Amino acid sequence: MIRQEEISSVLDGQKNMFLNKTPKVKREAFSDIPIIENFATIITGIRRCGKSTLLLQVLRNKFKDALYLNFEDIRLTGFDATDFIRLEKEISRRGIKVLFFDEIQLIERWEIFIHQLLNQEYQVFVTGSNASLLSKELGTHLTGRQLSMELFPFSFTEFLSFKALFPNKDSALEYLKTGGMPEYIKNNHPQILSNLLNDILIRDIAIRHGIRDLETLKKIAIYLITNVGKPVSGNNLAKVFGFKSTTTILEYFNYLQDSYLVEFLPQFNYSLKAQNRNPKKVYTLDNGFNEVLTMSFTEDDGRKLENCVYQHLRRSSHELYYFKEKRECDFLVFENNQIKQIVQVCYQLNDENFDREYQGLLEAMRFFNISEGIIVTLEQEDEFEKDGTMVKVVKLWDYLTDK
């Protein structure tokens, strides 16, 4: 239980810190934020990717004033559902109708509180680092009165703006290495990402799901981060880490994905059963983790590039697959169940790999009756036209800037 005076003090202190931020880059996601009266706007994303900074940009561009409260403040330790009554009184006393809540899902029955605020015609924004907790709990109590979006680490164009760089080979290589986490880009200290990994594993997974064996959880996370672009299966990893049940390792996979640390790309198949049965490829949503946390990955430029292209595609699509029949193609991009783009990734095309990469792309193009495909490389450009098909080879920095 928190006293009214303490809640008021935290609100004042957090608001001062919140307003004193000076965002250096206007986030590209700003134009996509859904804002409708009597609907809660839900913004999810990995910790420290800039959600509160995005809220500040919303405040300065859309509203005159807003109340901001981050529930991970140590001064709010002990805050429970009954304290929402005191918080509501404080909100009412201040007369502010726009509310920003960060990590409010830490408090039981928070979704009922949000529902009540919407009924009182407040404009509510909720940010959090766990995708399924927010969507499941809000979906139960708000009955469709929520609008959701995801925020990711800096895109390549945001990275260029933040660092005042031009799109070229050097900036592309730097982005492949550092990724897009704002604090890491700014300070370039590996411990920032190491600490962030621990925060995610402890706060977003271990505490919320009652996992006691934190050491094994961390080993699994680092294993997956080390093996981006490779197929993984619950059965194989259950044996590697000594789990008696595949169910447990699959639960860990879900927890890691919900926290935006890793994601799993399914193999395309018209059968959902086959999709679930086939191995999925693992990717991360930021290359910095791969650089800092694993030694082997720093030597594999091809997977680093592939991981970066996945991140680029993931920012605008949930419908992503990899293709595998006789040959393999890295990415299929769908929109409303319709194929839109087929992408192969190769760090450098040469005599040894050209046939494999080119024919893998062509097989996927023929399968879906698509006439044009793309091969993303680090710095090569070319075009191959044959039998009514066009394959374009594009440089990474052109692809990431949509040229």
Image (tube, rainbow, N blue to C red):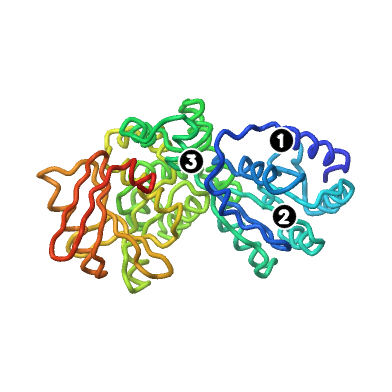
Other residues around mark 2 within 10 Å, as few (<14) / some (14–19) / many (≥20):
many
Q: Amino acid at mark 1?
A: Leu
SS of the residue under disc 3:
loop
Q: Quick one: label 3 or label 1, which is nearer the N terminus?
A: 1
Residue at horizontal 42 percent and vertical 37 percent from the top: 179
Q: Amino acid at mark 2?
A: Val
Residue 279's disc is none
Q: Amino acid at mark 3?
A: Phe
Residue behind mark 2? 124
Residue at horizontal 29 percent and vertical 55 percent from the top: 343
SS of the residue under disc 1:
helix
Other residues around mark 1 within 10 Å, as few (<14) / some (14–19) / many (≥20):
few
Q: Quick one: label 2 or label 1, which is nearer the N terminus?
A: 1
Q: Using residue 174 as the reference point, say whether residue 369 is left or right of it.
A: left
Q: How many marks?
A: 3
Q: Using residue 190 as the reference point, say whether residue 326 is left or right of it.
A: left
Residue 19's disc is 1
Residue 397, horizontal then vertical, whole percent: 34, 40
Residue 4, horizontal then vertical, whole percent: 88, 43
SS of the residue under disc 2:
strand
Q: Quick one: label 2 or label 3, which is nearer the N terminus?
A: 2
Residue at horizontal 43 percent and vertical 44 percent from the top: 221
Between 150 and 37, the residue placed more toward the observer is: 37
Between 96 and 386, the residue placed more toward the observer is: 386
Residue behind mark 3? 154
Q: CA distance from mark 2 to mark 1?
A: 18 Å
Instruction: Give the image quarter of residue 250.
Output: bottom left
